[in-house]
Image: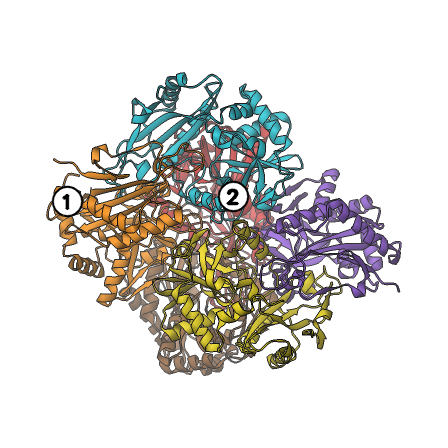
Chain colours: A orange, B cyan, C red, D brown, E yellow, F purple
Amino acid sequence: MKERTVYINGKFVPESEAKISIFDAGFCTGEGITEVTRTFKHKPFKLDEHIKRLYRSLKMTGIDPGMKTEEMTRLTLEVLKRNLPLIEEDDDCCIVHNITAGERGHPYFGGGAGSTTVVIYCAPVGFRWYARQYETGIHLVTPSNRMYPPQCLDPKIKHRSRMYARIAELQAKLVDPEARALLLDLEGNISEGTGFNLFIVTDGVLRTPTTRNILAGISRATVLELAEKMGIPAVEEDLQPYDVSNADEAFYTSTSPCVLPVTKFNGAPIGDGVPGPITKRLLKAWSDLVGVDIVKQALDHMDDPQ
Amino acid sequence: MKERTVYINGKFVPESEAKISIFDAGFCTGEGITEVTRTFKHKPFKLDEHIKRLYRSLKMTGIDPGMKTEEMTRLTLEVLKRNLPLIEEDDDCCIVHNITAGERGHPYFGGGAGSTTVVIYCAPVGFRWYARQYETGIHLVTPSNRMYPPQCLDPKIKHRSRMYARIAELQAKLVDPEARALLLDLEGNISEGTGFNLFIVTDGVLRTPTTRNILAGISRATVLELAEKMGIPAVEEDLQPYDVSNADEAFYTSTSPCVLPVTKFNGAPIGDGVPGPITKRLLKAWSDLVGVDIVKQALDHMDDPQ
Amino acid sequence: MKERTVYINGKFVPESEAKISIFDAGFCTGEGITEVTRTFKHKPFKLDEHIKRLYRSLKMTGIDPGMKTEEMTRLTLEVLKRNLPLIEEDDDCCIVHNITAGERGHPYFGGGAGSTTVVIYCAPVGFRWYARQYETGIHLVTPSNRMYPPQCLDPKIKHRSRMYARIAELQAKLVDPEARALLLDLEGNISEGTGFNLFIVTDGVLRTPTTRNILAGISRATVLELAEKMGIPAVEEDLQPYDVSNADEAFYTSTSPCVLPVTKFNGAPIGDGVPGPITKRLLKAWSDLVGVDIVKQALDHMDDPQ
Amino acid sequence: MKERTVYINGKFVPESEAKISIFDAGFCTGEGITEVTRTFKHKPFKLDEHIKRLYRSLKMTGIDPGMKTEEMTRLTLEVLKRNLPLIEEDDDCCIVHNITAGERGHPYFGGGAGSTTVVIYCAPVGFRWYARQYETGIHLVTPSNRMYPPQCLDPKIKHRSRMYARIAELQAKLVDPEARALLLDLEGNISEGTGFNLFIVTDGVLRTPTTRNILAGISRATVLELAEKMGIPAVEEDLQPYDVSNADEAFYTSTSPCVLPVTKFNGAPIGDGVPGPITKRLLKAWSDLVGVDIVKQALDHMDDPQ
Amino acid sequence: MKERTVYINGKFVPESEAKISIFDAGFCTGEGITEVTRTFKHKPFKLDEHIKRLYRSLKMTGIDPGMKTEEMTRLTLEVLKRNLPLIEEDDDCCIVHNITAGERGHPYFGGGAGSTTVVIYCAPVGFRWYARQYETGIHLVTPSNRMYPPQCLDPKIKHRSRMYARIAELQAKLVDPEARALLLDLEGNISEGTGFNLFIVTDGVLRTPTTRNILAGISRATVLELAEKMGIPAVEEDLQPYDVSNADEAFYTSTSPCVLPVTKFNGAPIGDGVPGPITKRLLKAWSDLVGVDIVKQALDHMDDPQ
Amino acid sequence: MKERTVYINGKFVPESEAKISIFDAGFCTGEGITEVTRTFKHKPFKLDEHIKRLYRSLKMTGIDPGMKTEEMTRLTLEVLKRNLPLIEEDDDCCIVHNITAGERGHPYFGGGAGSTTVVIYCAPVGFRWYARQYETGIHLVTPSNRMYPPQCLDPKIKHRSRMYARIAELQAKLVDPEARALLLDLEGNISEGTGFNLFIVTDGVLRTPTTRNILAGISRATVLELAEKMGIPAVEEDLQPYDVSNADEAFYTSTSPCVLPVTKFNGAPIGDGVPGPITKRLLKAWSDLVGVDIVKQALDHMDDPQ
């Protein structure tokens, strides 16, 4: 089988040769910025929004990618084009950007990094990790550690310093190895999960935290747009565990699964404990939007080798 | 010139071949643990304490290094031994441990990492970055972002998710390109710098923050031990910028420079604006302890190629 | 078998007739103050301290018990005396004070309670609940909810408004049905458990949170006194989960078990995962102090009917 | 005079025999959930909403009432029916639910409660406590203690652990024996009173705190519904003492009085110091909705024996 | 040149004779309340709103001005009238109210102030300080100190205890002597500057912090009114530095300059680094509203002696 | 009677002519720094410490007094010397420093103050305000507003921006016109009063808050020094209202009264409700230190005209 192609710092290399230095700031200090864009029918979904958010993250962290958004977009599409021959017709992929502060003369002094490291690659969609949860729903658990607040590092920056998330996942998995962590903020409000945004449905209204201290998810925005078109009222507001526990239904949004039902929270079922009707309608609407049956595709590919 | 040797996952390789996968969790999500141990006269200083802290960090983050401390110590000494031929007699080096959650099947699902990545290598001491500051002292600036609190991720864990520190350094360098950032905690107390612990001297008393929300620095502990031997009273307590601004003298501790004078704070001189007498006595005592004139060695090597 | 006797509002009644009105403020709004004093060899342990703390709690909550400490002590001893015939020679009991704001004309207006309700009774020591944990140690888990801060209600008040503790226990038991909850405070420091104070041992030093935002446990004070006599250094300071996780040993203090080993924290063993030597020495010293082998007594009585 | 009937755990008993054990968790640890539903013309007002909120509180606290909402509703109506003969035609009553974690084997170990205690009873409306304040308005005072935050225990749970409220009332009554306490949250925003929600009117707009950290009062919701029908604009937002102090008018909502004017705040009059026009219009609209002149009924019955 | 006239405590005096006692509470303890009202074409702009806010501040601080709003308005217009002869036709002025707790018998005991001090005067508009920034825009910097929260002193009170602002300005000017400070609140949200409110524009939407913890600026309200008329959508919400940094344009509002472009934030350009189109449209609309070309007037008068 | 002499900006003027401009930053924005030094037997007490603290405050606020500490001391003694003829032999005085950022070109732009304003004057000791409280003790009340935290403005700076203290006093006086306010910090710990530091005595131990977020009072330091000499153990730690309420005795320290008994707290007596024995011993020791019977002097002069 032919190998995937990775773009690193101006070169296209086979994935097995895509290595970075142990002195790279992305490895040494987590000083990296990322985006993950999914394709539907081999077309990147909302690539412009992802590139725009990428540059916002870069600006806030003072990392200069060395090119304008147009060139970044062009390279992204080039990486996709080179990898498409490896992707089956009914399959799709994720395009990952990973941009770091680069290799340092000495990793422990701020004396300035060398040139920025830019990596762009295609990865299989992780269907295997979540496909069956379209039917069963996932279990979310609130760990005892808290989401870091914007005054330390703004969660609107999509960065790669995620050790806090590891701690959170470890705690959630003590409760249930299949569970994922939903972090509270320092005031005890729901913030975000380890890579996803939460939505709940109460009395027919979609409710989700504001972007004050979470990533402004592009999938999250897509759900809000779909809801508006479908006439489903939606509010952005502070939510607490009480609201999740007593919701009629819940789901999370994330680039790969788009919308994934949440059916259990801290050990107790949400509503009837099965994926809810509004969750399903949103998945249907998104599928229509992109011309791919999102759930079916995931189930069809969940056993693909990756 | 012969190349340095790096230990990666069971192999000793030349530094130029020491690369890690772009799918390594250390690169993808900053899920890495580190230690930096300095040598004096080619002997590692307090290696046991560094190994012990390494394992504390690993335990809290659920990363299994796949070996006990004895084996880790043995490997560390082996790395040093293989690199010593490259280090001149009056020079020294830093031994760096970098242990990550390893390569993942898919970077965006917590489905579990593969085997842990263990990297051990020797790096030159970064004399060039700080040697002249033994004489002039350094300028510290409090940025407007805050140190993350222990309930998000405990700073006593020496991890590699340091994007917050990049933001802090960017702000400090707006004031003075030579300055470094000293972060406040969420309550406005002095926490730690971007890689160092702060000490001040007020009326003959050494004062430094408690380890409640900072790294429990091994250099910091060394200063407290030296002070006790020298009869210098020392207290660990909450400090505020007022205390730093009005201190008689100040310095920071860090593995490479040991004790580095701080002579300016937020644009104003501390005390007389020159390294203070207790700072100098501590440097002298430490030099005596390890049999190396710490300042002289740094000045002698500050122009070495690295 | 003869029945135990309970003191309620001036009368001594059989336990089965010891009922309170559904309009009592202790039942309607949790406005009650309590103490639990344990006997050793049928003598109440530190009764004066318990009575003193009882009156401190009453003062802060504006509940007037209608008698001075001397009379309260006299009544307490009378309750004990009346119940002693039911307690076997090698057994002991707990004496419980429960003092509430009394019966109200109308439970939802603050128009003032009627007379205070004073209940004093003897209860069997709950050996069955913890005896085997002297050997295995207990598992503590940090729930995601937080201890309430002193500015809402001071935890130094021993009151009966403990719904927060129920939530905490529910979460801890999701991880392990045998675990108990150890709550963090709003800053993420260790506060107290649901009815106990925590101690850890690090490098031979006893460490426990200050009484800033916990109950100032009388068992906690006893351990500090014993430690002083035994020459074990002890500090009261802010502790974080990192400290517990990396402690050499841990235990908790509580009136009934006195000192109970803690051997697991958030799913991972503390130290070697067995009760530690200092924990055992303290249990021995306490046993010597009161002339009862605390552990043996618990094991001997763990199958008693209660 | 015939006695009222109380439902306790499957039995209907005369009120004077309605007692609970001193070992009940509702008495020992405040682990109880409650609702108070008022009748108008002998019909319970919004009983469905009260039952729904009751079950939300029970879910969050893991208390199993042992029956579904339908059965709870049926029992509630049965309790009302049995008590109606004692209520005069122009009078009304409150139906109180009090559901606790039940009697424990041992009150100090979390080893699990026995069966849940379910109490349902009718109580006279407390007209005497507030009737005259429809004309004079009430004085609210902010005490120095703070409302507990949702991350300790969510105020949306209507529980019976209210010792904090006692402290707050004690402080308010130091200023004015007729005053009641309006608590601030930890950030200094207005939260709720000791049993009521606050509304203010500024330039014709109704303003009230969001349900982030208060009880989502059913009377509060009724006012928002009435305001919408009456074309009075209303916003839910964070409010501070400045806003209350400078409001044009203010009132609070609570089950018994529905809407009660607030005319004084921290010692100074609100607006002109008399009940405001929008307050009166809301009372009128609510009276129309339920077919009872709410103010007149209260004044007529304020001297009833209770 | 004739001198300006100042009103102090019932008298009109020449400005050079307008002195206050060194025992005045406004001088001794910063216990003063203020308003600054600007004229356009010699007419005070929104004087009623300023007087209303003045009385709100006085109420919250318990300072009795000794007169009703009508008399305060009359005196204000009288002060303006007496100073108008000194103001050129195309020039304008600021009318300043400064009302303090008055002269004390002894400045360090709260034994009560004497009579309130009321000062009203006219000052030249500070064109020189900002005129050129209509073209270049201003640089805002977030200092490391924080805005005081409403629970200490509500920023909606326009008082004269501004030492915190001095600290903030000192830090901002370390970065750029031309910069001004934009303070974050304790949670890290944007609050207000040292005398101004911030607005940003993102994707055509005006965004500004809520009045939860800032001064409810009258210029801020004017911009919101103009925006509504012009069909520019506007939201009041919590904003973070990320939002400012990535805004398309930004400006601040303040009584003298009305709307001043902000083009740089923490060292980096906002948008293209020049005043934005919506900023300019708002300046134009405001100019139309008051019949004065605000920018032109400022540029024409920036070299006037003051 | 001859008039007192005041030093203002290089001149000695009669007190009645000591006026400052209405444009002075001390008046306009509370940007002033102060010290109050008391004399005993006409000698200033701890003048060096006061001058030292004055310069610390000035440094943190960037106000340049235009002279070194030696000259400031010389001028201070000169002011005292010129006023001594007006002070009776058994009387004393306070020497007040008031140093502000000076007169501004325009009070609303930070464009920089002109020259600093330096005022030094003598004021009568305010015996009348507190003398009788040596016998009765004072009543302290915790208001609902909070002390500002160091991250907004460090309370160790003795500044003149005290509007928050006015709000606090207003609330305390609602409870009791004779009471003074004792502020809590944002976490609910005791901070300081409006011009004084608090001490309590518990079981023979002096306890007082740390200087983390209070003024480091010179009288407070004097008490700690006296206690050490007298063998009274003393600790600096976080205290809560519970500790004050349940203390055996309490007092506050402040420059004029030195040590003033506190006998009531939030409406309830502290201990027996009379000045305590340790309080009295400290007053005696201080009197011995300075050779003045502090209480007697106050009582003798409490009716002096001032």
User: Which residue is the site of mark 2?
Assistant: B176
- Position in image of residue B279 (x %, y %): 60, 31
Which of discs 2 and 1 lies nearer the camera? The answer is 2
- Position in image of residue E52 (x %, y %): 55, 75
- The reply, left or right, for residue A279 in relation to residue E119 is left
User: Which residue is the site of mark 1?
Assistant: A84
Q: CA distance from mark 2 to mark 1?
A: 49 Å
Amino acid of disc 1 = Leu
Above or below, comparing residue E289 to residue F14 in the picture:
below
Q: Residues within 10 Å of mark 1 (few under 14, many from 20)?
A: some
SS of the residue at dot 2?
A: loop
Instruction: Specify the subunit that label 2 lies on.
Output: B
Above or below, comparing residue C207 to residue D304 in the picture:
above
Quadrant containing the C terminus of chain C is top left
Residue closest to the eye, C159 or B121 = B121
- Position in image of residue B195 (x %, y %): 47, 36
Q: Is residue F198 visible?
A: yes
- Quadrant for residue D274, please give it: bottom right
Q: Is residue A256 visible?
A: no
Quadrant containing the N terminus of chain C is top left
- The reply, left or right, for residue F114 in relation to residue C120 is right
- Quadrant for residue A189, please give it: bottom left
Toward the left, the furthest residue is A89
Badge 2 and badge 1 in a common chain: no
Task: Determine whether label 2 and label 1 are within 8 Å by CB.
Answer: no
Amino acid of disc 2 = Asp
- Position in image of residue E193 (x %, y %): 51, 60
SS of the residue at dot 1?
A: helix
Q: Residues within 10 Å of mark 2 (few under 14, many from 20)?
A: some
Instruction: Specify the subunit that label 1 lies on.
Output: A
- The reply, left or right, for residue A281 in relation to residue D24 is left
Residue closest to the eye, C92 or C213 = C213
